[in-house]
Image (cartoon, grey):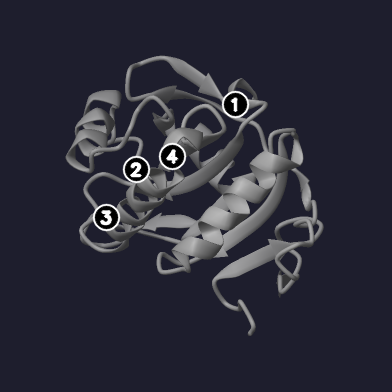
Amino acid sequence: MSRWPTRLLLLGILSCPVHAHDAPREQRLPAIRPAPDFTLTSQDGVHVSLRDFRGRVVVVTFIFASCTDSCPLLTDTMVRVQDKLGPAFGPRVAFVSITVDPERDTPEVLRQYADSFSADLRGWAFLTGDPASIRDVARKYGVFARETSVGDIDHTFLTSLVDPKGILRVQYLGVRFDLEEFRRDLLSLANESN
């Protein structure tokens, strides 16, 4: 059964064509390239870099707190995966949600957003920064955002999986994907380093 269009592998740079990944479950997920690093500000006002998560699988998503459409669906999906991961969440798998609306999403706003979803902040960072830095990080991950005429933000939904060595391995497209496949991919990447 094809996994298109939910799980994608980006080969080469992000501007190249996107290809589906349909590897058997026992096959390792291919390495795409080193994941773009970033240093942004967390919901607690602390600087956080991707390299701070070395040794753990990192899930990178892009959201904004005032979204009433797809962002809450994606965050809810991540909370369900967080819960299914059990004790692996935090020590072996971490989530990073980066805002695409840094002008409104202050650390305090992101903290309230995280709390409203019962996100476990022991393994999940909600990040903001100056608009130029956010645009740069989003672009490097293949996420494009623009403000609409009514002040909303349209953006692409790519959920990126980064392995414990900092290599981008898979990107899921959209907000509705197979949670069990996603959980298996996370645990597979976490187990590679054992």
Mark 2 vs mark 3: which is more N-terminal? 3
Q: Is 83 on the left or on the right of 50, as rendered?
A: left
For the C terminus, the image quarter is top right
Provide the residue designation for mark 2.
101
Q: Quadrant of residue 13?
A: bottom right
The secondary element bearing badge 3 is classed as: helix
Q: Residue at x 79, y 56 (%)?
A: 30
The residues bearing labels 4 and 2 have C-alpha atoms spaced at a distance of: 9 Å
Give me the C-alpha separation between circle 1 and circle 3. 24 Å
Q: Residue at x 30, y 25 (%)?
A: 107
Q: Name the residue under label 1.
A: 53
Residue with the mark numbered 3: 72
Tell me the residue that label 4 is attached to: 98
Type of amino acid at the residue the image marks with label 4: Ile
Crowding near pointer 1: few (<14 within 10 Å), some, many (20+)?
many
Where disc 2 sits, the SS reads loop
Contact? badges 1 and 2 (CB < 8 Å): no
Extreme-top residue of the structure: 46
